[in-house]
Amino acid sequence: MQNSFFNMALKQAARLMGKPGRVARILAELVVKISRVDWSTEGRPNLKAQISLIGRLIKANLTGTYKLKSTRVLVGLLAACIYFINPFDLVPDLLVGIGLVDDMAIIAWVFSSAATELKAFEEWEKVTSASL
């Protein structure tokens, strides 16, 4: 995907590998952003579910309870989170009504690219929560 803002997020995500404190801060910012977004607009509930799943996967990987098979996938997922929490990207989030359009596109693309890993994580979550 050709998006200079996402490319910057990818570089930032790559630099964060091996820095769990900084990744945890990104996840905390993600939780705050998720809580502040109006998810009632068409298409956004799906975006909320996708970004929440991505955040849970990154957290599980960070805490060591789930191991991703690919560092490249982890970098892409983290970059999507960075892009989502950044209010000044290709279409600034401050533009009411259209501000999350680019975020939705990035998340959909990353979600599709990492679909196998995300599905495996969802299955792992179901098994893990059922055994508790």
Image (spheres, helix red, strand yellow):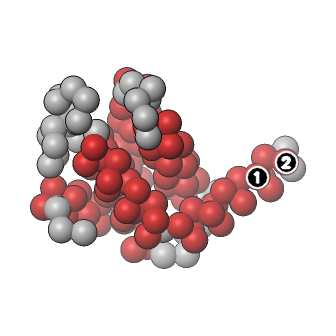
Secondary structure found at label 2: helix
What residue is pinned by disc 2? 130
Residue 20 in the figure: left or right of residue 63: left
| Residue 81 image point, x, y percent | 36, 49
Task: Tell me the residue at 37%/62% (across/down).
Answer: 109
Picture quadrant of residue 26 = top left
Q: Nearer the viewer, residue 74 or 53?
A: 53
The N terminus lies in which quarter of the figure? bottom left
Mark number for residue 84? none
| Residue 109 against residue 128 in the figure, above or below | below
* Image location of residue 50, percent across then percent down: 50, 48
**Quarter of the figure with residue 67:** bottom right
Q: What residue is rendered at 32% in x and 54% in y?
A: 105
Q: Is residue 15 visible?
A: no
**Does 126 appear above or below 111?**
above
Amino acid carrying label 1: it is: Lys
Q: Amino acid at mark 2?
A: Ala
Q: In the rendered image, which residue does mark 1 sit on? A: 126
Q: Residue 97: x, y in percent?
A: 25, 29
**Horizontal and vertical percent position of residue 80:** 34, 54
Q: Nearer the viewer, residue 90 or 125?
A: 90
| Tag 2 and tag 1, C-beta contact below 8 Å | yes
